Amino acid sequence: MTKSPKKGTSAKLRSAAFKRIRADHSAELAEDYVEMIADLIDERGEARCTDVAMRLGVANATVVKTLKRLQTMGLVTQEPYRAIFLTADGWKMAEDGKRKHALVEKFLLALGVSQDTARIDSEGIEHHVSVETLRAMGKFLVRNGG
Amino acid sequence: MTKSPKKGTSAKLRSAAFKRIRADHSAELAEDYVEMIADLIDERGEARCTDVAMRLGVANATVVKTLKRLQTMGLVTQEPYRAIFLTADGWKMAEDGKRKHALVEKFLLALGVSQDTARIDSEGIEHHVSVETLRAMGKFLVRNGG
DNA sequence: TTTAAAGTTTAGCATAGGCTAAGTTATATG
DNA sequence: CATATAACTTAGCCTATGCTAAACTTTAAA
């Protein structure tokens, strides 16, 4: 038994899917942070560590550590003991993310899912939808009065 | 500026979504391994480390280490230098996962997404859809000749 | 203006998941 | 049946993400 080619899915194509998932995961956290920081700035004028920690449901120290990474990635800037700001790249990522998130959430609602579930599931799904799928969701919304 | 209740989303509800995502992620890898092992057993009679590593696109040593964890989780069993087997729990998880995966993939196809994209995206999405959303996808398939 | 509270940072630890390189066991072939 | 090759394991490293506890700033109140 060496090579059953059954189902027509090559090993390369298969592993590509998993590779993309792993890549998605490392980008995912950055997107969540950046989106949340943008929301906080919009809502209350500034984003503080504590607020981010509360909303994400993690410890303060965790946020501090992650922000360091986001800083080296060029997404946020911060002075010690001061509020958090987004760079131009950070704002772009936040806006792209929010647009994507909103589309997925609206799509789920149009599919007939409850508000709470739509909110929760869209948070998880948004990072795994390709542009093509996103576009298909958009078309569905148009067809179904979104 | 203390507490803007804007948008009606409580901090608790919000953080719950992220907590679920983190929980999903740790379960996700286990599910992927278990599904893949089940596929290999079905396709070629046994699952070997190397095949799993190739399909996931990771190094052999990584698979070995992860299998240790799956063993302590009671999902797989294995003798040194021998093939990998699933426990009853492992089979159950694999079957649930495959059913979920197939539904999501069919749903994406019905939405109008290409075969390749459906395959790749469903791999990422399947771990983040609740039962409610899954059911809504099922209904959509019924309405749209799935 | 001192001081207490709130917020931020640092230090140190754990786990998960990835890697390479080196060693060990099975197996297939000459 | 000896041995080369393929498969598996171990050891040791790295990064990301989480935590708690302790130290340090800011800010607000007495």
Image (tube, coloured by chain):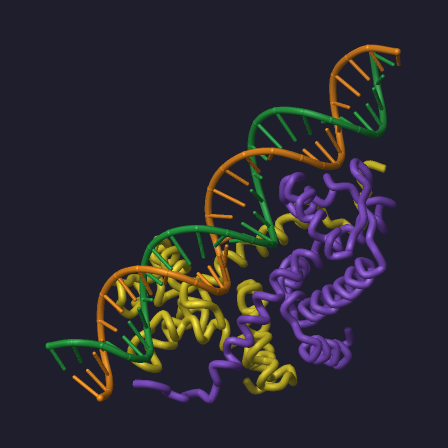
Chain colours: A purple, B yellow, C orange, D green
Q: Quadrant of residue B104?
A: bottom right
- The answer to whether residue B135 of the structure is visible from this angle is no
A42 lies above or below A142: above
**Foreground pick, A117 / A80:** A80
Residue plotted at (38% across, 62% down): B64
Q: Quadrant of residue B109?
A: bottom right
**Foreground pick, D7 / B132:** D7
A15 lies above or below D8: below
Residue C17 rendering spot, x and y as whole percentages? 50, 60
Residue plotted at (45% across, 73% down): B98
Check the picture and name the quadrant holding the C terminus of chain A: bottom right
- The answer to whether residue A82 of the structure is visible from this angle is yes
**Left or right of residue A14, residue A135 in this image:** right
Count of marks placed on residues: 0
Residue plotted at (71% across, 76% down): A131
Residue plotted at (62% across, 86% down): B114
**Foreground pick, A51 / D20:** D20
Check the picture and name the quadrant holding the N terminus of chain A: bottom left
**Left or right of residue B68, residue B127 in this image:** right
B16 lies above or below C1: below
**Left or right of residue B93, residue A102 in this image:** right
Q: Quadrant of residue A74?
A: bottom right
Residue A54 rendering spot, x and y as whole percentages? 69, 42
Residue D20 rendering spot, x and y as whole percentages? 56, 32
Residue A62 rendering spot, x and y as whole percentages? 64, 43
